[in-house]
Amino acid sequence: MTEIVWCKKCDTVNYLDPYNFWNFKGHVRCAECGTTYYVHLINGFYYEGPREEKSDKYIMPLYADKPYDGYSYYLPGTPERTRPFVCLPSERPPTGKPFYVKFSIRGKPTRGWAPQPPSSGLAGSMGFKWDIKKLSPEVWKEYQEKLKRGEVREW
Ligand SMILES: [Zn+2]
């Protein structure tokens, strides 16, 4: 957690998670009563706020609880109260299947992906002999296109 917004109207503690609020300027809505607060956080600490300020544009906290009410709480993803817990990169939605990194960050083919032929030996250890053109023609083709587009670099 970075900081909290302790709503004095309803004594609810709204926890500001680092995923959204590490560097944040905007409004947070109290999970219990819906009051919006202006907050400005820099590196996880308050720079301004929290102060009550009406706004239609807000972010809900990830989690909220009420310490004076036996710690009743709102877990992540409670509709209209808290956000769902999604700390996954949005460009890779969860599919339940592993994805293979076929190219390094410099655009060169890697050797880590499957399927590897039985001739690769124990645990597919091809060492320096990964014949990409023969073993993975589709990756080879993709690599040639990457070369043409200039997406392959040394450093
Ligand atoms: Zn409140």
Image: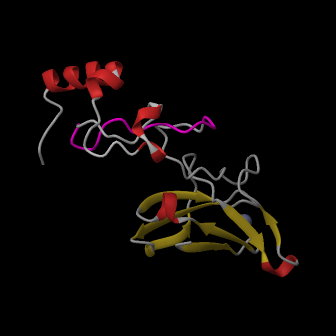
Q: Quadrant of the N terminus?
A: bottom right
Residue 56 vertical position relative to residue 149 in the rendered view, above or below: below
139 lies left or right of 145: right
> Looking at the magenta stretch, what is its main secondary structure?
loop
Give the residue displayed 60% in from the left and 73% down from the top. 4
Residue at the outermost right position: 70
Residue 29 vertical position relative to residue 132 in the rendered view, above or below: below
146 lies left or right of 51: left
Q: Is residue 97 magenta?
A: yes
Between 8 and 80, which is closer to the camera in this rendering? 80
Residue 110 screen position, x and y as percent:
31, 40
Residue 154 screen position, x and y as percent:
11, 44
Give the residue displayed 52% in from the left and 73% down from the top. 2
Between 126 and 138, which is closer to the camera in this rendering? 126
Give the residue displayed 34% in from the left and 42% down from the top. 126
Between 56 and 89, which is closer to the camera in this rendering? 89
Give the residue displayed 59% in from the left and 39% down from the top. 94
- In this orientation, does residue 55 appear? yes
Total labels drawn: 0
**Which stretch is magenta?**
95-107
Q: Is residue 37 magenta?
A: no
Which quadrant contains ligand 1? bottom right
